[in-house]
Amino acid sequence: MSYGGFSLPNGFPFQPSDEELLNHYLQKKNQREDPEITAIIPEIDVSKHEPRDLPALVFTGAEFLDRD
């Protein structure tokens, strides 16, 4: 497998850290490269809402989640 100028052996474990995953997706979101990421990670003006209301606002636009 070759990626980014270096090659990895088959079966190489892919275990990115939480920080690496967040950096990857937030960079794409900030650069508006992927509309799906923009839909999944909403932008909320926290100064206009009470802290107790924020969890509900985060999932308002995430239609792909089943919330029973």
Image: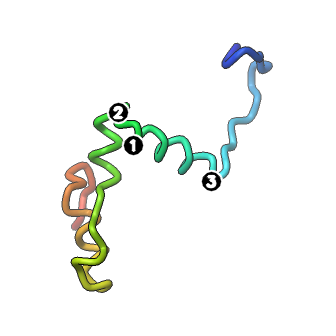
Instruction: Count residues near mark 3 (Cα–Cα under 10 Å), then give few for <14, some for 14-19, many for 20+.
Output: few
Q: Residue 34 has which mark?
A: 2
The amino acid on which the numbered mark 2 sits, given as a three-letter code, is Asp
Say if 42 sits above or below 45 in the image.
Answer: above
The amino acid on which the numbered mark 1 sits, given as a three-letter code, is Lys
In the orientation shown, which residue stands out farthest toward the right? 9
Q: Nearer the viewer, mark 3 or mark 1?
A: 1
Question: Residue 43 sits in which quadrant?
Answer: bottom left
Precedes in sequence: disc 3 or disc 1: 3
Instruction: Count residues near mark 2 (Cα–Cα under 10 Å), then give few for <14, some for 14-19, many for 20+.
Output: few
Say if 29 sits above or below 5 in the image.
Answer: below
Q: Which is nearer the eye, 46 or 41? A: 46
Q: CA distance from mark 2 to mark 1?
A: 7 Å
Please name the residue that numbered disc 1 is placed on: 29
The amino acid on which the numbered mark 3 sits, given as a three-letter code, is Glu
Question: Residue 14 sits in which quadrant?
Answer: top right
- The quadrant of the image that shows the C terminus is bottom left
Q: Is residue 10 visible?
A: yes
Q: Residue 19 has which mark?
A: 3
Q: CA distance from mark 3 to mark 1?
A: 15 Å
Q: Is residue 15 left or right of residue 59?
A: right
Q: Is residue 1 visible?
A: no
Q: CA distance from mark 3 to mark 2?
A: 19 Å
Residue 11: give x, y in percent of width and height: 74, 25
**How many numbered tags mark residues here?**
3
Residue at the spot 72% in from the left edge and 14% down from the top edge: 5
